[in-house]
Image (cartoon, grey):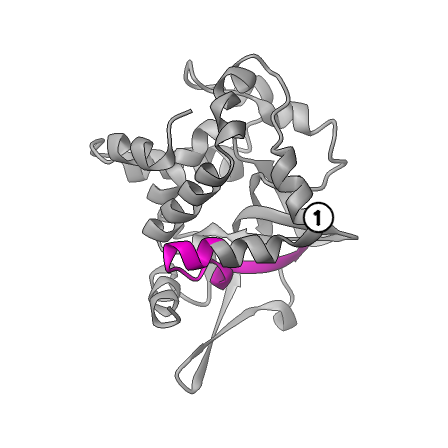
Amino acid sequence: MESPTEIYKYLSSITNINKIANDVLFEKYIIQNKTGYNKIQNIEDTDQESILATLNGGYPIIGLIYTFVYKPTIEEINVIMSGKKPEKYMDHVPLVFCTSVKGKMFSGINLNVLPPIERLKFLQLYYDTFKDFFKDLELKTQNNILAINKKFLTLSLNNSSDLIKIWSNRANSTFSFGYRNYYIEKVDRLRSIEYVEWSYIPFFKSENATKMMNINKVHNLYWKNQ
């Protein structure tokens, strides 16, 4: 599997790449809710999701990226400090890189909250850190062989926050800005994003991801918190 940066360079030349990203990451998974064979649209498409569904009992698996509909209570609405004024917004359709699962809750980095270029940095660092895993990934997924990053899973069970801090320092970024906790009972349509579709994440506009605040304003607040 090529690095996220190399794939990004290639996809950047496609004029309607933002629409394609939205069609894949939002329309297909959330609106149309396509599963199994029905979600196979291109020759390179895979269906790891069906294999994973037999393992996780309805919970996310550490090291994978998920999208879903989330309905938080008023108390759980996210608050970002902007100067002296708190800014409130709701994560309605997150895109989460899962870092831990505990009890009835899972946690991770909501990539929607990170500006597009920061998402690319995050994916590239994950790729660089676990090159051995990604080296054979394409062969496994295309042959319907289970592909889980066991090394990252083991590290996360110890303390995933340390690794996120290391990656943030390397990239001069604040990936923890997107860190969120989610209660599984409030999750609707939990969908695992196929590895081959991770390449669309830096191009995803995620206009439907938040309520009470425009996603562009969330990204502006990210840069202010750098």
Residue that appears at 58% across and 57% down = 162
Give residue 71's position: percent from left, percent from top. Answer: 62, 57
Residue 179 vs 111, above or below: the answer is below
Residue that appears at 79% across and 53% down = 103
Q: Amino acid at mark 1?
A: Leu
Relative to 58, 31 lies left or right: left
Residue 200 vs 137, above or below: the answer is below
Q: Which residues are magenta?
A: 167-184
Helix, strand or loop status at disc 1? helix
Give residue 145's position: percent from left, percent from top. Answer: 62, 17
Question: Which quarter of the rendering shows the C terminus?
Answer: bottom left
Residue 134 vs 120, above or below: the answer is above
Relative to 128, 97 lies left or right: right
Q: Is residue 182 magenta?
A: yes
Residue 24 vs 77, above or below: the answer is above
Relative to 184, 180 lies left or right: left
Residue that appears at 49% across and 40% down = 129
Give residue 49's position: percent from left, percent from top. Answer: 61, 28
Q: Is residue 127 visible?
A: yes
Q: Quadrant of residue 35?
A: top right
Question: Quick one: which residue is furthest to the bottom in this view?
Answer: 84
Give residue 40's position: percent from left, percent from top. Answer: 49, 19
Q: Which residue is mark 1?
A: 157
Q: Is residue 108 magenta?
A: no
Total labels: the figure holds: 1
Q: Is residue 184 visible?
A: no
Question: Quick one: which residue is furthest to the right in this view?
Answer: 103
Quick one: 126 or 40, which is closer to the camera?
126
Question: Which quarter of the rendering shows the N terminus?
Answer: top left
Structural crowding at the residue carrying mark 1, measured as other residues with C-alpha within 10 Å and reported as few (<14), some (14–19) or many (≥20): few
